Amino acid sequence: MDEKKRHIYKSLKIWQLGIEIAFDVSDIVIEFPKHEKYDLSSQMSRCSVSMPSNIAEGSARINKSFSHFLDISLGSSFELITQILVAKHRKYVDIKTEEKLINKITEFQKMTMGFQNGL
């Protein structure tokens, strides 16, 4: 692929899935206890927003730089899975929600790694 190529982030399936995950997390954390507002719910929100945000920011760069932003996005996705497990342990999310989110994030990770390998 051309090293100078830039991508239109809104047309990237990884960005679309990332934004969907961010919306899902936003809908879930609003139900968390108030004492989690600045702790777990805030961390989960930041991670989920970081995933598509870094794809969008990186898409304006050449592929070598874009790959770095994809690494950050992937790191946020792995962090988010950990936080979902903590939320499940604290009984803030049920098993169905946990599984659905983790499956989406795992799919996001596979798609992002595949996309990154193709740069």
Image: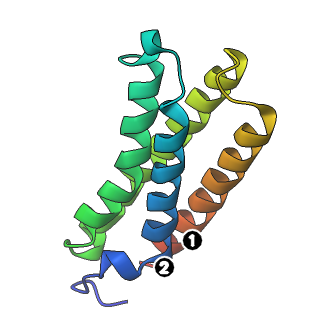
Residue 92 placement (x, y as % from top left): 64, 22
Q: Quote the CA–CA distance across marks 2 and 1.
A: 6 Å
Up the image or down, 66 lies above or below 99; here it is: below
User: Quadrant of the image for the N terminus?
Assistant: bottom left
Residue 69 placement (x, y as % from top left): 32, 57
Front in this rendered view, residue 105 or 94 = 94
Up the image or down, 90 lies above or below 70; here it is: above
**Residue 90 located left or right of residue 59:** right
- Quadrant in the rendering for residue 7: bottom left
Residue at 57% x, 71% y: name it: 114
Q: Amino acid at mark 2?
A: Gly
Front in this rendered view, residue 111 or 101 = 101
Front in this rendered view, residue 106 or 41 = 41
Q: Amino acid at mark 1?
A: Gly
Residue at 45% x, 26% y: name it: 41
- Quadrant in the rendering for residue 81: top right
The residue at which mark 1 appears reads as 114
Which of the numbered marks, if any, corresponds to residue 44? none
**Residue 13 located left or right of residue 70:** right
Label 2 close to label 1 by CB (< 8 Å)? yes
Residue 19 placement (x, y as % from top left): 44, 60
Regarding mark 2 in the picture, which secondary structure is present there? loop
Q: How many residues crowd mark 1 within 10 Å: few (<14), some (14–19), many (20+)?
A: few
User: Quadrant of the image for the C terminus?
Assistant: bottom left
Q: How many residues crowd mark 2 within 10 Å: few (<14), some (14–19), many (20+)?
A: few
User: Count of labels shown?
Assistant: 2
The residue at which mark 2 appears reads as 118
Residue at 68% x, 29% y: name it: 93
Front in this rendered view, residue 2 or 106 = 106
